[in-house]
Amino acid sequence: MAKSAAEIREAFEQLRGEVDASGGVRSIDMASLRNMVGAGRLADGPLEQIRLALESRGLKASGLSNWGEDYTLVYDTTSPIGRIIAAATASGPDSDKELLSAVTGFTGGADPRDEELNELRDMLDQVRAIVSVSQ
């Protein structure tokens, strides 16, 4: 099951292409990542090898598990969706601000709270129209 460096490099380049083709994120099972590095099991060494192979291609996993059946999101750290995933999984004092900034950037500068407020206003207008018709 051992793989050469060239085979590992080719497998992760292919994954990079799949992430790019799917808009910056791809869900993948841990068994597939394990097979890409030619490991027998998902111990600390293979997990570190996977992490480094992803990072060297500008990719990151939302989490790396020891279980082959588990899934992770592999994402481009520079893509809009990647910035949202990174911000949503961060845990720091400014994580909320980073997430809001990432989402605002993803929506083209529109504050997502504005969109929600507009939806609520539309619903209120509909309720008012129903109430006025029934009176």
Image (spheres, helix red, strand yellow):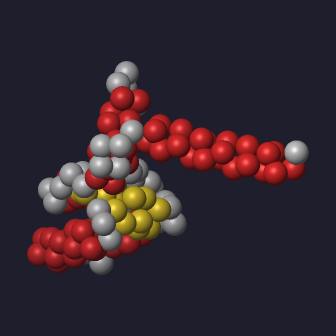
Where in the figure is residue 112, as x and y percent of width and height?
44, 42
Residue nearest the observer in this picture, 134 or 112: 134
Judge left or right: residue 73 versus residue 126. Answer: left
Residue 18 position by quadrant: bottom left
Where in the figure is residue 19, as x and y percent of width and height?
28, 68
Asked if one can make out residue 94 in the rendered structure from this viewpoint, the answer is yes
Where in the figure is residue 13, as x and y percent of width and height?
18, 72
For the N terminus, the quadrant is: bottom left
Residue 87 position by quadrant: top left
Asked if one can make out residue 49 in the rendered structure from this viewpoint, the answer is no
Tell me the residue at 57%/46% (across/down): 119
Judge left or right: residue 27 versus residue 38. Answer: right
Residue nearest the observer in this picture, 121 or 3: 121
Residue nearest the observer in this picture, 22 or 108: 108
Q: Is residue 5 above or below residue 42?
A: below
Tell me the residue at 60%/47% (across/down): 122
Tell me the residue at 87%/50% (across/down): 134
For the C terminus, the quadrant is: top right
Residue 73 position by quadrant: bottom left
Where in the figure is residue 51, as x and y percent of width and height?
26, 53
